Image: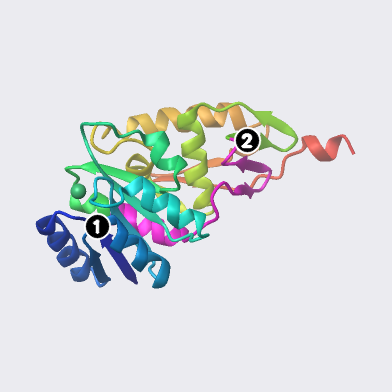
Amino acid sequence: MRILIVEDELSMARSLARGLEAEGYSVDVAADGEQGLARAVSEPFDAIVLDLMLPKLNGYAVTEALRARGATVPVLMLTAKQGEFDQTEALDTGADDFLSKPFSYPVLLARLRALIRRGGAPQGAVLSYGDLRLDTSEHRCWQGEREVMLTKREHSLISYLLHRSGQAVAKTELLDHVWDPVTERDPNVVEVYVGYLRRKLDEPGQPSHIETVRSFGYRLVAVEGQRASDTD
Ligand code: CA
């Protein structure tokens, strides 16, 4: 696995590189946006850790240019806690995930692993499993023929579970990816939102779409809905 770190603070870049190398990744470092973009378009990387504030081209401009060239490599953007950072803007330019500085190293590793696992999934894909369908660019969800209205958080949660459909996902992993890991550490919030989703997605007399994995987390299961076939 090959990672590109684009970061102008040398000490940060070095400690990140050392940490990732210790995990078995092969790591390259670029010190400004232009250099980062040049390397990202010409060499194969499995993921890019991209600082937002960079000389020459900032992180937004780098991701935008990358996506404009059709590169689907996963991008994890590092942002400063204070300042002009806007999560929506970061996602709109094509970053797959973001982490605010200062971050904990295990969280960075977990997110990087998840991004690599997901791979360069096309942006705005339609995900489906069993009778569930989610259009991630339009933020619309269907259970069978029925459209289900979801809040932003519910959408993020079902989207993450759909990416990992059929697999058991730990509550802590969901907290790390769907919530802000700096401000939200209470696993109860995951239970609450799984409850909301079940109420919206499940049908009476049918198995739940989200199975509880005892003292671990949840698994999305394929449910073949009745509604569509009943009307045939
Ligand atoms: Ca910087």
Where does the image place residue 52, in percent across and percent down from the top left? Answer: 28, 46
Viewer-nearest residue: 95 or 135: 95
Badge 1 amino acid? Asp
Q: Which residues are magenta?
A: 109-138
- Kindly indicate the quadrant of the structure image that contains residue 21: bottom left
- Residues tagged 2 and 1 counted as in contact (Cβ below 8 A): no
Q: Secondary structure at mark 2?
A: strand
Is residue 164 found left or right of 6 in the rendered image?
A: right
Q: Earlier in the sequence, mark 2 or mark 1?
A: 1
Q: Residues within 10 Å of mark 2 (few under 14, many from 20)?
A: many
Picture quarter with the N terminus: bottom left
Viewer-nearest residue: 227 or 120: 120
Badge 2 amino acid? Cys
Is residue 30 found left or right of 148 in the rendered image?
A: left
- Kindly indicate the quadrant of the structure image that contains residue 192: top left
- 3D distance between C-alphas at marks 2 and 1: 39 Å
- Kindly indicate the quadrant of the structure image that contains residue 183: top left
The answer to whether residue 58 of the structure is visible from this angle is yes
Q: Residue at x 44, y 30 (%)?
A: 193
Does 28 appear above or below 111?
Answer: below
Q: Secondary structure at mark 1?
A: loop
Is residue 90 found left or right of 102 in the rendered image?
A: right
What residue would you read off at disc 1? 32
Q: Is mark 1 within 8 Å of ligand 1?
A: no
What residue would you read off at disc 2? 141
Residue 129 is covered by the magenta coloring = yes
Q: Residue at x 19, y 52 (%)?
A: 105
Residue 89 is covered by the magenta coloring = no
